[in-house]
Each structure stands twice: as C-alpha cells, then as structure tokens.
Image: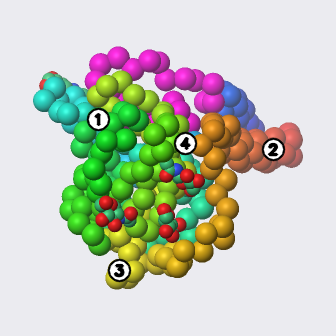
Amino acid sequence: MKPLIPTLLLLLLHHIHFSTSQSPSQPPTPSGPTNVTAILEKAGQYTTFIRLMKSTQVADQINTQLNNSQSNGLTLFAPTDNAFSSLPAGTMNSLTDQQKVALIQFHVLPTFMSVAAFQTASNPLRTQAGNANNGQYPLNVTTDGNRAVNVTTGVVNATVSNTVYSDGQLAVYGLDKVLLPLAIFGPASAAPAPAPSGGGKGSKPSSSASGDTSADGSGDASDSGVRDGKGLAMVGVLIWWLVRMI
Ligand SMILES: *[C@@H]1O[C@H](CO)[C@@H](O)[C@H](O)[C@H]1NC(C)=O
Ligand SMILES: *[C@@H]1O[C@H](CO)[C@@H](O)[C@H](O)[C@H]1NC(C)=O
Ligand SMILES: *[C@@H]1O[C@H](CO)[C@@H](O)[C@H](O)[C@H]1NC(C)=O
Ligand SMILES: *[C@@H]1O[C@H](CO)[C@@H](O)[C@H](O)[C@H]1NC(C)=O
Ligand SMILES: *[C@@H]1O[C@H](CO)[C@@H](O)[C@H](O)[C@H]1NC(C)=O
C-alpha cells in the first residue's frame, strides 16, 4: 500500500495544477483563418451553442466558408447559455440529429450583415437551413431605426443583445433566445412548441431592454464555479483517504 501514496500525491498535485491553470488562460489572438469557435469561446456565455456547433459540424462548415476568399461572408446569431437553459425541459433532446443540424444552420445567414444592413433587409431572410417559405425556415428581422434589432421565427421573438464580433466578413450577434424554426416547432409539427398565444400583450414581461448589456460573462462564471466545486470535493476525498492510509 505504501508505494501508492507518492503516486496519489502526484495525482493530487496534478489535479490542483490542472484546475488552477485552466480558468485564466485566454486563447491567443487568432492568426490565420477566422475561427468561429475561438471567437465564441473568448466571448464566454456561449458554451451550449459552441457544443452544438461542434457536434453538428456547422462550426467546421463556417470556418471552411470563411477561409474561402470567394465567400460573401457570414452572419451568426449566437444564443446565450441562458437562452438554452430557459427552453422547456427536454426541448433539445427531443430533436433528431438532422433537426439539430437544421436548428443550428437556422442561426447562420449566408452573407455578412452589419446592424445597419438589417434596416434595409427584406423579410423573410434566407438562412443556411434553406427554404424560407412560411412553415419552413423563415427568419424575419425588425429594427427601430436605432441600433435595436429583433428577430422572429413565427415561434419565438428574440432580441439581439450585443455584437460579439464583426470584421466585415463575419458578424456574430448575441441573442437572448434560441431561434426555433416553424418547420420543427410550428403548430403543424410534432415537437413541443410554445403555444402561439392570441396576442396576450404584457403577459410575459421580457427583461431584455435594449440598453441592457450587463449580462456579459456572468453565465460563464457560475459554470466554472460548479466545476471548481466538484474538483474541490474530489481533492477533499483524496486527502481524507491519504490521511487514513498513513
Ligand atoms: C478553433 O478554435 C478552437 C478553440 O480555440 C480549437 O479547439 C480549434 O482547434 C480551432 N480550429 C482550427 C481549425 O484552428
Ligand atoms: C484555407 O485556405 C487555404 C487556401 O485555399 C488552404 O491552403 C488552407 O489549408 C485553408 N485552411 C484551413 C484551416 O482550412
Ligand atoms: C423588440 O422586442 C421588444 C420586446 O421583446 C420590444 O419592446 C421592442 O420594441 C422591439 N424592437 C423592435 C425594433 O422591434
Ligand atoms: C415575415 O415577413 C413576411 C414578409 O413581410 C411576412 O409575410 C411574414 O408573415 C412574417 N413572419 C413573421 C413570423 O413575422
Ligand atoms: C412575437 O411578437 C408578435 C408581435 O410583434 C406577437 O404578435 C407574437 O405573439 C409574439 N410571439 C411570441 C411567441 O411571443
């Protein structure tokens, strides 16, 4: 038993080093082709969207398109982690792999669009999910002549909370809601959809006033707090065990 102890100590030290060196590391400024995953990681609070972009391979598609000099650029609507966690329970799990791909592609416009460009855009916009006909994947944008931008799918109304990134080729906008397309969540489809209420106005007070940018990064902080707590508990158990061995 005794020779085990140095090994365990090493493991312990390794764990402590691993958990402390994780959080402060900022990815270096990306050189070379634009990397949409790196941009979202740096912004924080988009971990669910990043995971889905990776698992559906839409992230790879986007990076490949951005690296093509012929492209007209891309626009990405990125729902925050809060947007995903406020979906009804089981919403994402009820989707097939194909529907997940369509859902993520629905958040991508095949051209670069500045905030100003939204003011003159004609609805419905075409997304990378394809067919923008009613009942399929239409996406409407409304602006108020200022910098406020709303996005509606016919199932949800979302508000652009901030510009995460914009370089003339790729624009990334933060969104307070997940864009649920009619094709998957509309009244005619099988998946659970929020009932289209008949114009009940103030029934659901939205907290998203256009001036509110205070939410930046807060979701990310609580996430890593949970992870650190788990790590600490593991270290505690190891120490307790070591003490008993000696
Ligand atoms: C993009 O960035 C992510 C996260 O920083 C990294 O894991 C991935 O390897 C990068 N992809 C490319 C093609 O550089
Ligand atoms: C980007 O495009 C160039 C030229 O087309 C190619 O050589 C390079 O491998 C591409 N890089 C990535 C990360 O796709
Ligand atoms: C966007 O939606 C919010 C409510 O969700 C509303 O108060 C605001 O007027 C809308 N703005 C535009 C430009 O449609
Ligand atoms: C989107 O805009 C089109 C064209 O103005 C309109 O016909 C359609 O009803 C709108 N859909 C939604 C959900 O607002
Ligand atoms: C979205 O906004 C429109 C008015 O702009 C409203 O008629 C509709 O009920 C809203 N839908 C949801 C799901 O809140």
Q: Which residue is mark 3?
A: 189
The foreground one among 141 and 213 is 141
- Give me the C-alpha separation between circle 3 and circle 2: 50 Å
Residue behind mark 1: 112
* Three-letter amino acid code of the residue under disc 3: Ser
Identity, as a three-letter code, of the amino acid under mark 4 = Ser
**Labels 4, 3: front one:** 4
Q: Is residue 94 left or right of residue 88?
A: left
Going 27% across and 69% down the picture, which residue do you hit? 134
How far apart are the two marked residues, 4 and 2, measured between alpha carbons?
Answer: 41 Å
Query: Which type of secondary structure does the marked residue at label 1 adopt?
Result: loop
Residue at far front of view: 145
Where is 25 relative to 124, above or below?
above
Q: Which residue is mark 4?
A: 161
Q: Residue at x 42, y 59 (%)?
A: 152
Mark 3 / mark 2, whichever is N-terminal:
3
- Looking at the rendered structure, the kind of residue marked 1 is Phe
Q: Are marks 2 and 1 in contact (CB under 8 Å)?
A: no
Pointer 4 with pointer 3, Cβ within 8 A: no
Label number found at residue 236: 2
Q: Which residues are magenta?
A: 21-44
